[in-house]
Image (cartoon, rainbow, N blue to C red):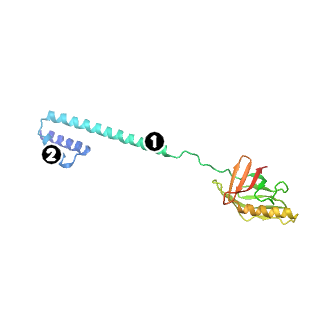
Amino acid sequence: MLIAESIGAFQIQDICRRMSIVPFLLSSATRCVLRLPSRRLHGILLTLTERNENTMRRTSNTFTSVGLIVILFALGCHNTTPVAVTPSLRDTKWQLAASIDATLDPAKFAITADFDETNMSGRSAVNRYGGPYAVSSDGSFKTGALHSTRMAGPEDAMRAESTYFELLGRARRYSVTGANLTLTDEGSQTILTFTAR
């Protein structure tokens, strides 16, 4: 009888701990239950075990449900709007089509801009030019120090060339729409427009 009571006490204490019963209730419950007949004690142990398993099962299901809700909420809050990315200028060739300055008339002068990965080059009315440039996917644009040949030409052509370099230096953003390349300044004003060639 003492052995049965001892086993019963250990089982009761283990179940109570799993069910998070506070210590003073645990010891009191153990003393009270051990006074019951062994058959009755066995029935109580089975009931407590089943309840414990059901509680753990419900707790597991609750955590699983909460986890799914959190995941779905995170996915729902995720911004799925695609971010606009400005096309690269690498391996593109352009012909000047319009300028903010009237002295730079594309119909009178051959002005071009060809881009590789890090450098741009082309004709600038009279001379040929080249130098580094930098762009980013958000549309920023900036030229480095440009160099050119030193041929002389008609006054209006030399003036157009000087204006072109000045406007290139002011360009801070670019956009490509279809067959058009547009350069804008810090104030978002269009200063040069090119067409693909």
- Image quadrant holding the N terminus, namely top left
Local crowd at mark 1 within 10 Å, few (<14), some, or many (≥20)? few
Q: Are marks 1 and 2 in contact (CB under 8 Å)?
A: no
Residue at image coords 66%, 59%: 187
Give the answer, above or below, for where 72 lies relative to 111.
above
| Number of marks | 2
Residue 25 is situated, as x and y percent measured from the top left of the image, at 18, 46
The local secondary structure at tag 2 comes to helix
Residue at image coords 77%, 63%: 165
Q: Residue 72 carries which label?
A: 1
Instruction: State the separation of the CA atoms marked 1 and 2.
Output: 45 Å
Q: In which quarter of the image is residue 81?
A: top right
Residue 30 is situated, as x and y percent measured from the top left of the image, at 16, 43
Residue 53 is situated, as x and y percent measured from the top left of the image, at 28, 37
Local crowd at mark 2 within 10 Å, few (<14), some, or many (≥20)? few
Q: Residue 29 carries which label?
A: none
Asked whether, in this view, residue 56 is left or right of residue 158, the answer is: left
Give the amino acid type for the residue marked by disc 1 in the picture: Leu
- Residue matched to label 2: 28
